Amino acid sequence: MPLPLQIILPILTFVLGAVLGLFICKKLVSKQLKENPPINKDMIRAMYRSMGRTPTEANVNQTMRAIQDAQKKSRK
């Protein structure tokens, strides 16, 4: 195999693999976010209503903080 081809082919393969990996990763992340959206305050309010409770803003904020703290602890 000629020397220029030995130099260009691995570089081209690496770039192609990186671009392909980026698109696959982006598609998987968007699919996960579509299937499992992040929890927001409206979801917490709906959860309180489904339990038969009237959600106050303090309850919603406390629950959001508890969820965020639990996520921070699980990442460590």
Image (cartoon, rainbow, N blue to C red):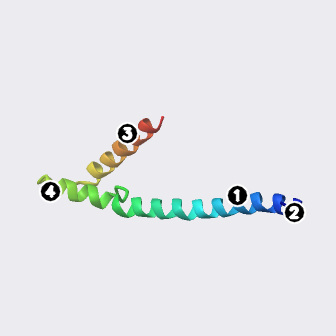
Residue 33's label in the rendered image is none
Q: Nearer the viewer, residue 70 or 48?
A: 70
Residue type (three-letter) at the residue carrying disc 3: Ala
Q: Are marks 3 and 4 in contact (CB under 8 Å)?
A: no
In this rendering, is residue 75 above or below 51? above
Quick check: 68 left or right of 25?
Answer: left
**How far apart, in angstroms, are the residues tagged by discs 2 and 1?**
16 Å
The picture places residue 70, in percent across and down from the top left corner, at: 37, 39
Q: Residues within 10 Å of mark 2 (few under 14, many from 20)?
A: few
Which residue is found at the position 24% from the left and 57% from the top?
Answer: 45
Residue type (three-letter) at the residue carrying disc 2: Pro
Residue 50's label in the rendered image is 4
The local secondary structure at tag 1 comes to helix
Q: Earlier in the sequence, mark 4 or mark 1?
A: 1
Q: Earlier in the sequence, mark 3 or mark 2?
A: 2
Instruction: Indicate the quadrant where residue 37 lies.
Output: bottom left
Which residue is found at the position 30% from the left and 46% from the top?
Answer: 63
Residue type (three-letter) at the residue carrying disc 4: Ser
**Of circles 2 and 1, which is in front?**
2
Residue with the most extreme right position: 3
The picture places residue 54, in percent across and down from the top left corner, at: 16, 55
Q: Which residue is mark 3?
A: 70
**How far apart, in angstroms, are the residues tagged by discs 1 and 3?**
39 Å
The picture places residue 11, in percent across and down from the top left corner, at: 76, 59
Q: Which residue is mark 1?
A: 14
Residue 4's label in the rendered image is 2
**How far apart, in angstroms, are the residues tagged by discs 3 and 2?**
54 Å
**How far apart, in angstroms, are the residues tagged by discs 3 and 4?**
23 Å
